[in-house]
């Protein structure tokens, strides 16, 4: 048996195959329609969008500390020496706080390490893949904590949506600004800044968006040569493929993972179509 266990929250969007093959435990966030709460793991994107189209204003909520505590205890009882948690940014959700509260309820809290990712969704998936790889390569806990913390420190994340009104539904943009932006054919760029989603700017062409992505990565490198990318498409394969090609052209030799789709919690904010990138450098 492996010495180390892994816990992700449900917004670390990796395939069921990857999660199952690596014995990853998943703690679910919730989506709330104002009356009823649903576990993210129990609904799909189409359910979210259908309800939005009928006028539902979705909100989200973090897991309870008890959800984490129960999983911690189960994994410790199985004999794991260390539990590593990759969760979405504490500045977006209370999930990190719930996990920390649960950790402090343990008799041996040192057996749990929670990474402060300051990232979300496909970017935490990027970090999660690196964690899985290090555990499978039998790295020590010290090596894992050191490297994962370092790459989080060099990471970035940004995305664009293809319908401004999806940002309205997610509470990120006013109806007036969305209407004006739609008339002008503006395309927003949302960036994770200090772990928070911020609408940084809008461009009129995809070419300018992709240039902003590339320029942002170059600015972040600070002399580091090895770059790893994660490209996400939410029903926008053409745009995402162009971004992928641009990144590989501008950063030859880089490692790139491509994934289609987000889950319900982030589909509330991104909508039916969008795409983005995350990266880290070493």
Image (cartoon, helix red, strand yellow):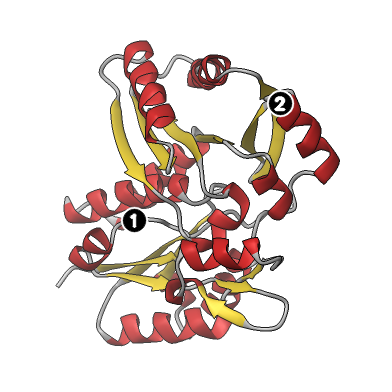
In-front residue for pair 176/265 = 176
Element at badge 1? loop
Q: Left of 153 or right of it: where is 98?
A: right
**Residue 225 in view:** no
Q: x and y percent of residue 146 in the render?
A: 40, 45
Residue at 18% over, 64% down: 21
Please tell me how crowded label 1 is: few (under 14), some (14-19), or many (20+) other residues with Cα within 10 Å: many
Q: Left of 104 or right of it: where is 45?
A: left
Q: Are marks 1 and 2 in contact (CB under 8 Å)?
A: no
Q: Left of 257 or right of it: where is 88?
A: right
In-front residue for pair 210/80 = 210
Q: x and y percent of residue 212 in the render?
A: 57, 18
Q: Residue furthest left?
A: 1
Q: Rounded to the nearest whole Å, what is the CA distance between mark 1 and mark 2? A: 29 Å
Please tell me how crowded label 2 is: few (under 14), some (14-19), or many (20+) other residues with Cα within 10 Å: few
Q: Left of 42 or right of it: where is 88?
A: right
The quadrant in which the N terminus is found is bottom left
Residue picked out by circle 2: 201
Residue at 48% over, 20% down: 221
Question: In which image quadrant can residue 164 be found?
Answer: top right
Q: x and y percent of residue 216 in the render?
A: 55, 20
The tag earlier along the polypeptide, 1 or 2, is 1
The quadrant in which the C terminus is found is top left
Residue picked out by circle 1: 14
Residue 244 image label: none
* Above or below, 273 relative to 31: above
Element at badge 2? strand
Residue at 74% over, 27% down: 183
* Above or below, 16 relative to 270: below
Q: x and y percent of residue 71 in the render?
A: 40, 82
In-front residue for pair 142/252 = 252
Question: In which image quadrant can residue 15 be found?
Answer: bottom left
């Amino acid at each position: 048996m492996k010495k180390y266990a892994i816990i992700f929250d449900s917004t670390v969007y990796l395939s069921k195959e990857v999660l199952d093959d690596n014995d990853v435990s998943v703690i679910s966030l919730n989506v709330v329609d104002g009356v009823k709460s649903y576990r993210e793991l129990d609904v799909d994107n189409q359910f979210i969008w259908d309800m939005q189209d009928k006028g539902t204003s979705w909100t989200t909520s973090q897991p309870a500390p008890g959800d984490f505590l129960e999983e911690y205890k189960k994994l410790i009882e199985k004999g794991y020496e260390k539990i590593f948690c990759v969760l979405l940014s504490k500045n977006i959700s209370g999930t990190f706080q719930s996990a920390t509260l649960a950790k402090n309820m343990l008799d041996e809290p040192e057996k749990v390490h929670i990474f402060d990712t300051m990232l979300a969704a496909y970017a935490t998936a990027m970090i999660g893949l690196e964690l899985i790889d290090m555990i499978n390569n039998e790295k020590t806990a010290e090596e894992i904590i050191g490297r994962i913390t370092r790459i989080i420190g060099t990471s970035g994340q940004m995305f664009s949506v293809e319908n401004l009104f999806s940002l309205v539904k997610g509470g990120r943009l006013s109806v007036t600004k969305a209407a004006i932006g739609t008339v002008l054919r503006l395309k927003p760029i949302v960036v994770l800044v200090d772990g928070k989603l911020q609408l940084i700017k809008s461009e009129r062409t995809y070419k300018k968006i992709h240039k902003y992505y590339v320029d942002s990565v170059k600015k972040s490198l600070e002399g580091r040569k090895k770059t790893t990318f994660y490209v996400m498409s939410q029903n926008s394969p053409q745009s995402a493929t162009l971004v992928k090609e641009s990144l590989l052209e501008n950063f030859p030799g880089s490692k790139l993972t491509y994934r289609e789709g987000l889950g319900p919690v982030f589909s509330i904010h991104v909508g039916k179509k969008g795409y983005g990138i995350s990266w880290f450098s070493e």
